[in-house]
Image: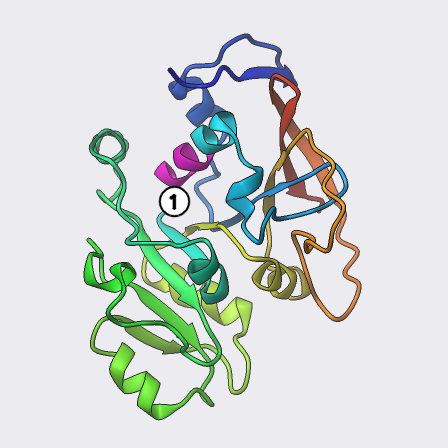
Amino acid sequence: MSAAIDAIWPEPARDLTDQQLLAAYRPPPSPWLRMNFISSLDGAATRDGRSGGLGDPADRRVFELLRRWADVVLLGAGTARVEGYGAMRLADDAVAWRRAHGLRPQPAFALVTRRLDLDPASAIFAEAPVRPIVYTAASAPETRRKVLGEVADIVDAGRTAVDPWAVRRDLENRGHARIHAEGGPTLFGAFLAAGAVDELCLTLAPTVEAGSAPRIAHDPEALPTPMRLAAILASGDELLLRYARSA
């Protein structure tokens, strides 16, 4: 049985169905980049090194539903390794829903890595229903480029670092206007610094963690970015918040 989720604001409603949740999270038709994260009350983005340690059934339910709207799921290579990502393959019911809404059966999977430090034999590539895209820098090692080029499209998106807007432009040129990013903090920080984030979906887990866990966004410089509250959902003591970037 799925975890019950209620709408608190702007329109209160009890025990939302999956269809109601999908309607609440529908992105605009124009190009849109959404970041999805979870955090403890004191700002920890992980427990025991993984964001999944903070989640519960309600967070997981929304996590999976958000992918249905995505043309592409975007992820940093470090997060893919730490969180144990496999192939980006949605379940049959999600595929049927996407077909009914005029979307491709499966979203593309795009990874960002400056050094191309990904395993080409991993399930991410070996079991992918859609050939993944890997964004890197022109300075990435040629040996790694050749090996990964056999299992993914390799795209240079900068000289020594990956330019977020180069990533967005390339994805949009491929027909992937709705970009759903799942981390991690370094990727989020880089995209914030570039002004390339349109929306943040943030689950606020009802726990205080202390310790040395990172925040959801990391960058050498402070990046004050005004956001406006778009919606509040709740499941028990957990809040699921949606913010859009202020104009």
> In the figure, 129 relative to 7: above or below?
below
Q: Which residues are magenta?
A: 63-69
> Residue 16 at what x, y percent from top left?
48, 14
> In the figure, 240 relative to 52: above or below?
above
On the image, which quarter does residue 36 sit in?
top right
Q: Is residue 89 left or right of residue 157?
A: left
Q: Say what secondary structure mark 1 lies in.
A: loop
Q: Is residue 57 left or right of residue 234?
A: left
Q: Residue lying at the far top in this picture: please name it.
A: 14
Q: Is residue 164 left or right of residue 129?
A: right
Examine the residues drawn in magenta and state their main secondary structure.
Answer: helix
> Residue 240 at what x, y percent from top left?
60, 29
Residue at x 65%, y 52% (from the top left corner): 216
> In the figure, 203 relative to 81: above or below?
above
State which quarter of the image contains the N terminus.
top left
Q: How many marks overall?
A: 1
> Residue 35 at what x, y percent from top left?
55, 48
> Residue 192 at what x, y percent from top left?
66, 59
Residue at x 25%, y 59% (from the top left corner): 123
Q: Nearer the viewer, residue 59 or 195?
A: 59
**Pointer 1 local density, CA inside 10 Å: few below 14, some 14–19, many at least 20:** many
Residue at x 80%, y 63% (from the top left corner): 222
Q: Amino acid at mark 1?
A: Ala
Within the magenta stretch, is there residue 16? no
**Residue denoted by label 1:** 70
Q: Is residue 53 left or right of residue 230?
A: left
Q: How is the image coloured?
A: rainbow
